Amino acid sequence: MLNKFKVLIITATFFFNLSSVINAKNFSPGYPECWQDNKNPIILNPKSSNQFCPLNSKLGHKFFLVDFTSPLKLAQVDWIKGRIFGDTLVKTTPPYHKISYMKIDDTPPQSQVINYSKCRAKTGDKSKFIGEETNSSCEGGKQIKEVFDAWKVLNAQFEKNFIKVNDIEGKQSLIFEYFFHVLRESKTDFTQDYPERELIIVSDLMQYSKRFSFYNHCKTNLEIIKPNKCKSFANLIKNKKVKNYIDDRKPKKQTLKNLKVTILYINHDYETRDGLSSSLVKLWEDLFNYIGVEDYEVIKQLDIK
């Protein structure tokens, strides 16, 4: 009887260990099997821009560029929050992928700070993401929940202070320049070292700088004060100064590796004439194609009236 009991124990242990090995093989390369993995522990230092990230691996980075150069009404703020914070963020971001937020405002990109940067802690619950559940062979469910709740509180506090209804009208709108700044500068930590990268631009897409302005390019009649309809991208780069400015900043193919660009297009049809929205989106799509961005998506906010 005792021998049978020992056999049962050995068999159960074997299948438990086998299950752990199988699960480990399903993890992405560099994914920590346990939150305090000896080889790749999770960073808990609150002062670190890599808090809740694996110490020795980079799994993915989701970078939000949020445009604050035009007034934001309540319906726009609510839509933006619903897209880039809360449950949506958890459901669309795999565990241990980095999340960063940066404002587009009158500050030159080179002088701008990253407002928030941390990895998404795992929930410990079952989800579509491999490795989301608590690994019972080396983690405690209570411990994982406490870490996730701590991350959730920090993210909610940041959301509260980051975006609000405002009437700010920027002196410039350097969307194009911020886009290249995030791609090119090492301090943004958005390099191709990450096997998955998504740059999300939350904006009304009205580029405005001394180099080139869509407020001029998107008027079919110079007597119209507000933009009406954008001319084509081909028309835009007929201007040699504009073409040279874009060409000089074209990223290398390697820089665009593992990159997806998502545009969350803030609706402003209520303050413009018909025709602007579709032609403006087409202008940016042609710009992305021209500089070599292959994977992009535009998600447009519905009319707010």
Image: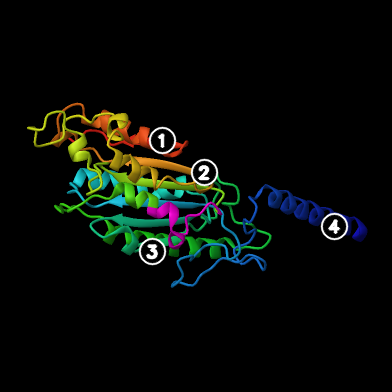
Whichever of labels 3 and 2 marks the residue nearer the N terminus, that label is: 3
Q: Tell me, yes or no, if residue 125 can be seen here.
A: yes
The CA distance from mark 2 to mark 4 is 54 Å
Mark 4 vs mark 1, foreground winner is 1
Q: Is residue 88 visible?
A: no
| Residues rendered magenta in the picture | 181-193
75 or 206, nearer to the observer: 206
Residue for badge 2: 253
Label for residue 290?
1
Q: Which residue is mark 4?
A: 10
Q: Earlier in the sequence, mark 2 or mark 1?
A: 2
Estimate the spatial distance between the alpha carbons at disc 4 and disc 1, rounded to whole Å.
62 Å
Give the alpha-carbon distance from disc 3 to disc 2, as whole Å: 36 Å
| Mark 3: amino acid | Leu
Looking at the image, do the residues carrying marks 3 and 2 touch, with CB atoms under 8 Å apart?
no
Crowdedness of circle 2 by 10 Å Cα count: few (<14), some, many (20+)?
few
Marked residue nearer the N-terminal end (3 or 4)? 4
Q: Secondary structure at mark 1?
A: helix
Amino acid type of the residue tagged 1 in the rendering: Tyr
Tell me if residue 237 comes above or below residue 157 in the rendering. above
Per the image, the residue denoted by label 3 is 154
